[in-house]
Every structure is written in structure tokens, then in C-alpha cells.
Image (tube, coloured by chain):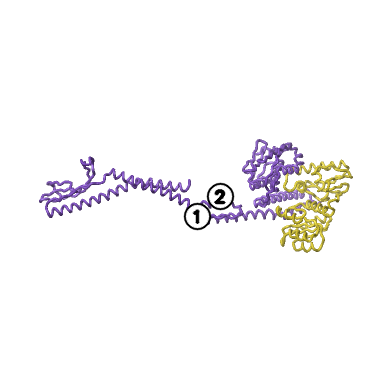
Chain colours: A purple, B yellow
């Protein structure tokens, strides 16, 4: 839910809850004030009447006079306010009054004088209140709504701009990100925190990358030395069988290490976008070249190749294209069985290679991660597909793996 | 031939020197940019082997200065970086070949010899080993003067062998020589084994000697010595 809707909903809920409260409070308040006012008028009238009685001994004319009654035996001074409803013939309806009775003496006769004053009709009052409150609330709601929208648009504008920039940003990106300044403290703080995080992330990424790069190429020279020495040792005639076997194991592990180093270097090189050339690569020709380089080994494994290559050109670095297709084809040859088959299809949409192989439980998710390998070929490093995936990432290709029983298919879609 | 190796790792330098001298070359070494520059001006070399990253300079600058003085020598870059830019740049400014570390000495040897042949004899000289004669231009191999019918990879194998005669050549070095270092397939060793059997048979058919010695399961030696 958007923030503006959320706040508006809260406002609305608040106002709706406030509505009856406002009516009740208003009702009692108005009633209280009206009663107060009426009582004041009646008290004032009483003073006037008593003053008149004192001076002249007769009741003055009074609009408020309700009735006078002789006080009986049980005379006592009592003053009270009372609400009554009288039917008024002239209005043909009942009208509420507030009465005030007090005792006095006329002609030395004790009497009780009652005064009355008309009150607001309750129904009318409630109705009036309801209308006026509703009107106020409506005003408030629309006011809040528009003000909120305005605030949302104006005050949050830099926030949304920055958000859309952040969405497109990745730590691998070389250009620094620029966030819009806003005069709102919270957003400024958020910007600062985000910038700090990005800087840290970038620094960590850079360090990691450099470490990767350094380690993978700094080991190459020592490896070259070790390997040469081992070959010299293997040439020696003084080794016995056991020693020779050990040296051979060392030699094989060195080779593995060297290949890992080379592959990791390649991966970080791809990540660094060192392959910037945009050659127009004729894929059909490239694939034929790769196949002819592997021709004899394909024959050797008695693999039957069927190909359907339509002329397709792709704009990418030819070295990367070569690595990508070599990897995919090599993969199909390597994980094939003797007398198996490979089917290659190429058109402007996709490149698809299907090979027969083992019925392995490979999952697409971890297939492309580093050092993931199929069960039988312990010699392979499991870096080939990670490299392929990296290359695909650069050009926005999509590489999909699928298996039906013993047929493994890699599909490379050139467009997203 | 006279070779100058410029490389800052002394151990690697010694190995290369040792290997090349056993091949009958005169090999000088230079562990730094400065000493390399001194030596180049002092002595005419046929082949220069240059590491790009040196502690006191860039190997590419050496190549540039050599080319500026139009000294005609073959240049092979050896580098741990395998950066495409370096490779292309190096070849552009006049290097003849590029090897990525770690390389097999047998591979370096093959490259040096091929380069030297191109430079010194314009590639026309044949390689001869007893009754075997190889013409690198036409990719033909003769045994007792008779043409050996070989597949492309079989030619590559025997050429690699003859160039690296009397040396232990590991299976891995052969595989890398045949397919480049991008293709490391388990099958390649079996493939090499089978094709060596074919090669032996073809040479034997032409009454050639079997010079291919299997060295345990490590690799092979092409030699007429014991």
C-alpha cells in the first residue's frame, strides 16, 4: 500500500471515529451553554420582578412569567430549575421550556412565581449538529486528501527520484551514483546512510575483486616454477616407483590448480568488462571452427553430430563468443558417452545443443554456480558453466538447461 | 641460437635457461628491466623472451625500444596476466607470440623453434630426426623419404615430439598444445593414447623406428637414446 493511501486511510478512520464523539460533545456543550444563558436570563428576570414587587407591590409585566400560585401551608423557600414541554396551540406542537420557580410575597401573601424561557428543540439541535459536523468533516477529509497528495508529490519527489536511481544501481557499476538533495532532514539522513553503505559495498567488492585477480594471477608464476621442477624430477632416473607416483600426483594437482587460477582470472576479467569489443561474429562459422578443432576427439568418442546452422551474426567480443560456444560444445562432448549423439541448432533466436549422457540429477539452480560438477567426471573443475553464465550476463543472453531422461539440452537465447 | 630471457622470477629464469641450454642454445638471462636493456644493446640475440610485469618496468617498453632500433629478433611474451589487451597490444607493437603462465617448457621450446625457423630460414628449413623428415610449411612428414599419411592432430603430435626430442613431454602439455588451454577434457588423454598407437603403427608401416617411449603414466619421450 502506498504511503499516501495509508495516511489518508488513517485520517479517514480517525475522522469517522471522531464524528459521533464530536456530535455528543457538541450536543452537551451547546445544551450546557444554552441552559446557562437561559438560567441567567431567568435569574435576572427574577431580580427585576422582586425589585418591582418591593417598590410597587404588584407584579410587573413580564414576557417570561409562566404562572403564580399561592404557596400553601407547607410553604418553604424553594428555588428550582426544571425542563418542561408544553403544547402550544399557536404553533400546534410541543415546545420545550426551562422553568424557574421561586417564592415571593405579593400583598403579604406568600406565592410561588414560575418563569419560563423557550429552549432549543432537541431534534433540531441534533440534526443541526449532524449537518454542521458532517460538513466540517467533509471539508477536513477533502482538505487532508489534497494536502497529502500535494505533500506526497512535492516533498517526496526527491525520494522517488533517488529510489528509481537506486533501483538501477549495482555495485559492479563503475559510474558513481548521485542522489538528489532534499531539504527534508529524514531524507538527507537516508541519503547519507545509503551513500555510506554503497561506498562500503563498493570498497568491499573492489577489494574482493582485486584479491581474486591478484591471487589467481600471482599464483601462476610460482606454479610454473613448481611444474617445471616436477617435470625435471619426473625425468630423473633415480626415482623409485613410489616416489614417481607421488611426484605424478603432485604434478596433476598443480595442473588442476593452474587451471582453476586461469578460469578464475577469466571470470574476474569478464566481470571487469575487459572484453569491450563489439565484433560482428558469424556464429555458424565460429561453431564450425570449434567443431573442426574437436573433430577428431568427437570421432574418437564415436559421437554422432547433427547440425542445423543458419547463418547468424551476433555483435559481441569474438573471444568471449569463442569461449562461450567452446564451453557449451566441449561440455556436450565431455559429458557424452561413447557412441552418443549431439544435436546443434542455431538460428537468430537461439543456439541449442542437446547431447546424450548420463541420467544425472542436476538442478538448474546450482548448475551454473562455481565448482559445481557432474558426478562421473572428477577431472572437470565445474567452472566452465560459471564462465558461460558470466558471458551471458554481460550480453543479456539467457542460458537454460533442460534434461529429458538421458538427453541434456542447453538453450542459449540471444534476446532477453 | 641466442636467446635472452627477461623474467623476474629467478627460479623460473633458471629453469628456462637450463632447458634451453640443454637444447643447445646460448641462453642469457635478465631478471630486471634495467639489466635487460643493458644486455640487448650489448649482444645480438635471435630470440627475446619477455615477461611483461617486471619490478622496475614494463616488458612492453623493452619490445618497443627494440623495435624502434629495428633490431630483427623474434619476441615471445610470457605473462601471468593473460589479459586480452596485453596480448593484442603486445602483438601489435611487434611481438611474435604470447604464452600465458604457467606454460610448459616443451611448449615454449616448440614456439621458440618455430619462431626461429620463420625468422632465420623464412620457414623453409625442414626438421630432420634420423629417418624422419618434417616439412613445417606443407605439414608433411616423410619416413625414409616416403610420405606419412597423417591426420592434422597426428601431425601436430609428431611435430611437437620431434621439436622436443629427448625430453619428457607430459600428457597435459600435449593436450594443451593440440587444443589450446581452454579445452581440458578427460577424453583428450585417451585420445592422445589412441592416436599415438596409430602414429607408431603408421611409422612402423614405413619401416621407421619406434622412437616414442612411454614414461610411466606421466607422458612420453621421443628419443633414440636409451
Q: Secondary structure at mark 1?
A: helix
Left or right, A64 with reference to A221? left
State whether residue A233 appears in this view: no
Residue B134 rendering spot, x and y as whole percentages? 85, 47
Residue at x 12% of width, y 46% of height: A72
Do marks 1 and 2 share a subunit? Answer: yes
- Residue A244 in the image: x percent, y percent? 77, 49
Quadrant placement of the C terminus of chain A: top right
| Circle 2 Cα neighbour tier, 10 Å, few/some/many (<14 / 14–19 / ≥20) | few
**Residue furthest front as drawn:** A90
**In the foreground, A32 or A300:** A32
Q: Position of residue B89 (x, y in %)?
A: 72, 55
Pointer 2 indicates a residue of which chain? Answer: A
Residue closest to the eye, A333 or A170: A170
Tell me how far mark 1 sits from mark 2, CA to CA: 17 Å
> The disc numbered 1 marks a residue on which chain?
A
Q: Which residue is mark 1?
A: A187
> Is residue A337 at all visible to an observer of this figure?
yes
Task: Identify residue for label 2.
Answer: A167
Q: Residues within 10 Å of mark 1 (few under 14, many from 20)?
A: some
Residue B161 versus residue A309 in the image, above or below: below
Viewer-proximal residue among A60 and B9: A60
Disc 1 + disc 2, Cβ < 8 Å: no
Amino acid at each position: 500500500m502506498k504511503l499516501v493511501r495509508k495516511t489518508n486511510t488513517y485520517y479517514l478512520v480517525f475522522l469517522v471515529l471522531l464524528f459521533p464523539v464530536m456530535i455528543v460533545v457538541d450536543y452537551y456543550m451547546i445544551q450546557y451553554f444554552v441552559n446557562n444563558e437561559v438560567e441567567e436570563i431567568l435569574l435576572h428576570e427574577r431580580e427585576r420582578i422582586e425589585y418591582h414587587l418591593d417598590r410597587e407591590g404588584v407584579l410587573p409585566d413580564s414576557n417570561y412569567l409562566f404562572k403564580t400560585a399561592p404557596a400553601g401551608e407547607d410553604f418553604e423557600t424553594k428555588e428550582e430549575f426544571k425542563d418542561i414541554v408544553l403544547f402550544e396551540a399557536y404553533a400546534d406542537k410541543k415546545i420545550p421550556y426551562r422553568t424557574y420557580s421561586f417564592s415571593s410575597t405579593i400583598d403579604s401573601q406568600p406565592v410561588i412565581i414560575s418563569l419560563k424561557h423557550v429552549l432549543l428543540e432537541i431534534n433540531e439541535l441534533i440534526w443541526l449538529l449532524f449537518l454542521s459536523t458532517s460538513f466540517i468533516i467533509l471539508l477536513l477529509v477533502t482538505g487532508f486528501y489534497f494536502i497529502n497528495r500535494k505533500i506526497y508529490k512535492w516533498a517526496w519527489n526527491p525520494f522517488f527520484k533517488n529510489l528509481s536511481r537506486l533501483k538501477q544501481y549495482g555495485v559492479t557499476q563503475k559510474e558513481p551514483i548521485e542522489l538528489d538533495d532534499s531539504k527534508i532532514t529524514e531524507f538527507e539522513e537516508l541519503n547519507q546512510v545509503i551513500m555510506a553503505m554503497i561506498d562500503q559495498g563498493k570498497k568491499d567488492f573492489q577489494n574482493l575483486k582485486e584479491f581474486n585477480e591478484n591471487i589467481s594471477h600471482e599464483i601462476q608464476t610460482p606454479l610454473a616454477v613448481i611444474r617445471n621442477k616436477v617435470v625435471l624430477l619426473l625425468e630423473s632416473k633415480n626415482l623409485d616407483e613410489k616416489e614417481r607416483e607421488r611426484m605424478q600426483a603432485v604434478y596433476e594437482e598443480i595442473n588442476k590448480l593452474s587451471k582453476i587460477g586461469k578460469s578464475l582470472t577469466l571470470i574476474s576479467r569478464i566481470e571487469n568488462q575487459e572484453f569491450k569489443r563489439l565484433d560482428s561474429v558469424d556464429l555458424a562459422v565460429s561453431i564450425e571452427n570449434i567443431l573442426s578443432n574437436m573433430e577428431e576427439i568427437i570421432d574418437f568418442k564415436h559421437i554422432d553430430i547433427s547440425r542445423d546452422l543458419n547463418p547468424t551474426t551476433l555483435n559481441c567480443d569474438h573471444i568471449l563468443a569463442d569461449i562461450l560456444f567452446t564451453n557449451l560444445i566441449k561440455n556436450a562432448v565431455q559429458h557424452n558417452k561413447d557412441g552418443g549423439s549431439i544435436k546443434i541448432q542455431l538460428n537468430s533466436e537461439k543456439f541449442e545443443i542437446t547431447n546424450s549422457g548420463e541420467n544425472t540429477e542436476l538442478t538448474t539452480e546450482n548448475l551454473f554456480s562455481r565448482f559445481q560438477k557432474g558426478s562421473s567426471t572428477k577431472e572437470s573443475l565445474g567452472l566452465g558453466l560459471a564462465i558461460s553464465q558470466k558471458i551471458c550476463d554481460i550480453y543479456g543472453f539467457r542460458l537454460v538447461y533442460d534434461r529429458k531422461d538421458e538427453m541434456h539440452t542447453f538453450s542459449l537465447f540471444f534476446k532477453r | 641460437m641466442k636467446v635472452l630471457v627477461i623474467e623476474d622470477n629467478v627460479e623460473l629464469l633458471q629453469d628456462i635457461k637450463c632447458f634451453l641450454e640443454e637444447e643447445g642454445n646460448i641462453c642469457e638471462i635478465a631478471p630486471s628491466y634495467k639489466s635487460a636493456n643493458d644486455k640487448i644493446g650489448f649482444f645480438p640475440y635471435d630470440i627475446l623472451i619477455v615477461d611483461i610485469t617486471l619490478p622496475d618496468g614494463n616488458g612492453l617498453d623493452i619490445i618497443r625500444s627494440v623495435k624502434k632500433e629495428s633490431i630483427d629478433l623474434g619476441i615471445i611474451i610470457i605473462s601471468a596476466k593473460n589479459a586480452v589487451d596485453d596480448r593484442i597490444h603486445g602483438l601489435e607493437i611487434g611481438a611474435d607470440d604470447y604464452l600465458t603462465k604457467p606454460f610448459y617448457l616443451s611448449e615454449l621450446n616448440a614456439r621458440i623453434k618455430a619462431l626461429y625457423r620463420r625468422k632465420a630460414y623464412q620457414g623453409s628449413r625442414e626438421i630432420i630426426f634420423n629417418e624422419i623428415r618434417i616439412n613445417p610449411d606443407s605439414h608433411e612428414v616423410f619416413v625414409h623419404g616416403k610420405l606419412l599419411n597423417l591426420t592434422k592432430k597426428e601431425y601436430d603430435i609428431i611435430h611437437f615430439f620431434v621439436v622436443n626430442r629427448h625430453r619428457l613431454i607430459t600428457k597435459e602439455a600435449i593436450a594443451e598444445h593440440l587444443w589450446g588451454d581452454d579445452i581440458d577434457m578427460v577424453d583428450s588423454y585417451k585420445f592422445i593414447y589412441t592416436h599415438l598407437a596409430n602414429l607408431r603403427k603408421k611409422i612402423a608401416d614405413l619401416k621407421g623406428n619406434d622412437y616414442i617411449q612411454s614414461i610411466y603414466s606421466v607422458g612420453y619421450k621421443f628419443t633414440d637414446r636409451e
